Amino acid sequence: MNTVRTFLKNADVKKIGVVSFYAYFAINILMKAFSYDHGDNIYKWFFYTAILFWGIKMVFTTYTMWEVFWITVMMGIGVMLSVITRQNMWLLSIMTVVAMKNCRFSVIAQIAVWIRCVAAVILSGGSLIGIFDIGEKTKLDSGYVEQHVYGFAMGEPNTAFLTVFLALLLVLYYNYEKLNVLWCGVTSLIALVFYKMTFCRTGVLVFFFCWVLILFDKVVKSKKIKSVLVCSVPVGAAFSLFTTLFYNGKHALLYKINHLVSGRVYIMNTYYKDQGLSLFPRTQEIFYTSYHGLVDNSYMHVTFYAGILVAVLFFVIILKTMLRLYRMECYKELVMIGTLALYGVLEQFVLNGFMNIFLLLCGILLYPGIVEEKHEK
């Protein structure tokens, strides 16, 4: 006991907490990068270890009364959502944000980029040389011709491309100031090669949309014009809600939009007609009573499951975060958020803070120091 007291007395308690948070984050990113989830035994052991590090971070960090109040509110919302919806995604993302005090987002991004790149190389390379099951399947292309696609030890081909996409996105963010034509050519070639092997149209289109936003940021110098970057999430949310509420298969434009997003609008509209919208969170079982498919849209996923009140709170927090980043002239962060805002119209993974680390930037509202104040005015 005396040894423990001596250690705590001499140690830099703040640094112990910070290192513990990075360990917690790295473990969770590692599990996601290798496509493990709560159904895998190995995931459970790593998850418990990560929670231990999270606990150490919370214990070894000093908080103000104001911070304690908001941590309590946020954790309460997270626990409520986890219990009612039976999805831990909400709680884990909130736990990560509230534990970010004294940490740096730049370090978080650095951890994520290295882990995701190494994981992508191991899984894809190992599959190509026969160490892992390459997961060959067939899939119909847009002309209804069968194409051979591969899961690269990650289950589904779409999951494989998503793994590569997230690695590339983090590489672009980490090297943002260096980006040029060569970077565009090399990363685009990698994306196209994996598109050819997975036939994930959604992912490759979003990847090139990312480069459009990067080009916009690099070319445009006016801060006022760059304010358009703040509109990405509001536009995505409004588009998703409008198409869900007013979809009509007989309307030519809405029919075309639904076709372009592989029937996602029809699925959301059918759920809306069957279950409606609720102010409060709802359990998943309600949607299983009349199952029509996955709600592959982050905006409507949070609205259907978490309820209108939580959804509005969530989007207000996101918007306030983006406005804060805009005032700080953190345009590369806004570019990444804008890219994932489009992916959010097509997938639900965007709500997971270990898949979309830019969601964790909401932490600047509670702990402004997590992003370096380079340009705030």
Image: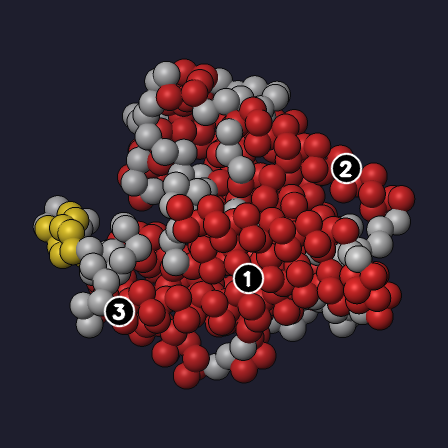
**Mark 3: few/some/many CA within 10 Å (<14, 14-19, 20+):** some
Please name the residue that numbered disc 3 is placed on.
126
Q: Quadrant of the N terminus?
A: bottom right
Residue 358 in picture, x, y percent from top left: 59, 57
Secondary element at image label 1: helix
In this picture, is 117 found above or below 142?
below
Report whether 256 appears left or right of 329: left
**Mark 1: few/some/many CA within 10 Å (<14, 14-19, 20+):** some
Report whether 257 appears left or right of 95: left
Residue 79 in picture, x, y percent from top left: 64, 32
Report whether 13 appears left or right of 282: right
The Cα atoms of the two marked residues, 1 and 2, are separated by 25 Å
Q: Mark 3 and mark 1 in contact? Answer it, CB < 8 Å.
A: no
Residue type at mark 2 is Thr
Q: Quadrant of the C terminus?
A: bottom right
Q: Quadrant of residue 101?
A: bottom right
Q: Mark 2 and mark 3 in contact? Answer it, CB < 8 Å.
A: no
Of the two numbered discs 3 and 1 on the same chain, state the one appearing first in sequence.
1
The Cα atoms of the two marked residues, 3 and 1, are separated by 22 Å
Q: Quadrant of residue 270?
A: top left
Please name the residue that numbered disc 2 is placed on.
72
